[in-house]
Amino acid sequence: MRRLINQRISRPLAFFLGALPFIIAILLYMAASTERLSENPNDKLLPAFSTMGDTLLRMATEENKRSGDILLWVDTLASLERLAMGVGISATIALLFGLTLGALPLLRANLSPFTTAISMVPPMALLPVLFIVFGLGEVSKVVLIVIGITPYLIRELQSRVSELPTEQWIKAQTLGANSWQLMLRMVLPQMLPRLVDALRLSMGAAWLFLIAAEAIASTEGLGYRIFLVRRYMAMDVILPYVVWISLLAIISDQLLKQLNRKLFPWYQPQ
């Protein structure tokens, strides 16, 4: 009996099925935009694609009259720098604590409940505290990303360490490995690709915390620009910026995926 769960899809069909929701969304937007603009040519809620394209081209190629900067690239660079710093610090902390909590029972009993409790605190609720403690500069924005994703990364790596087969631990100790050798030579190599996977899953949250911090206190950045122009209902700026942020998130996800494939080919599914 042929079942849906056993069906195999050809690559062209898979590409078409994957593209179909995007095509439908674009067509629906075009229809709604055309209808609104036919009733009111000055409507700002659903600007035409041509209007958004002209605005995006202007922001990507023309200098701002006040600052002399090309806004799209200045905003993009500022946001990516903050994101890279936050994610990099989070990955380093998570690798250190995830390995030790997963491998050392004494440390796990001591810090694992605290890590779990911290992971339950909504990071956005701490944003006013971060601004008070660290000011309105770059530090508070980076710290928000770190607080937002680090507990998840630590718990994810701790879980992955605990899932390592017992036979590996026994064989390594039989060969004379001590605790640090076990962590550095057996656990660490197996956790690095899992850390990259965890980073891929946390990138959406990292972008969320970044945009939120930039929207509240910043003078440049993608989130700052979106919330700056919202008071003018400049949807021809907001929508292209949202699409651009989404594209950057997809690119970062694919880069991490390719990094995992290049550095850890043994980890990839066959």
Image (spheres, rainbow, N blue to C red):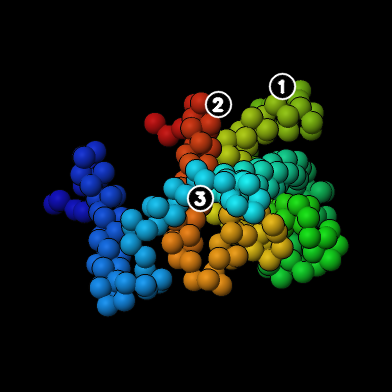
Quadrant of residue 51 within the rendered picture:
bottom left
Measure how far apart labels 2 and 1 are at the Cα level. Answer: 27 Å
Local packing at callout 2 (Cα closer than 10 Å; few below 14, some 14-19, many 20+) is few
As shown in the figure, which amino acid type bears the numbered disc 1? Answer: Leu
Q: Is residue 90 left or right of residue 225?
A: right
Identify the residue position indicated by label 3 in the image.
Answer: 59
Q: Which mark is residue 175?
A: 1
State the mark number for residue 263.
Answer: 2
Q: Which callout, 3 or 1, points to the residue nearer the camera?
A: 3
Task: Say above or below: 111 vs 61.
Answer: below
Front tag of 2 and 1: 2
Mark 3 and mark 1: Cα distance apart in space: 62 Å
The numbered dot on residue 3 is none
- At label 3, which amino acid type do we have? Met
Q: Quadrant of the C terminus?
A: top left
Which residue is situated farthest in the left direction here? 1
Q: Is residue 73 visible in this depiction of the protein? A: yes
Residue at coordinates 53% horizontally, 33% vertically from top-left?
260
Q: Is residue 267 visible?
A: no
Percent position (x, y) of residue 170? 68, 32
Residue 229 falls in which quadrant of the image?
bottom right
Q: Nearer the viewer, residue 263 or 127?
A: 127
Can you give x and y, in whole percent of width and height, for residue 86 in the image?
Answer: 69, 48
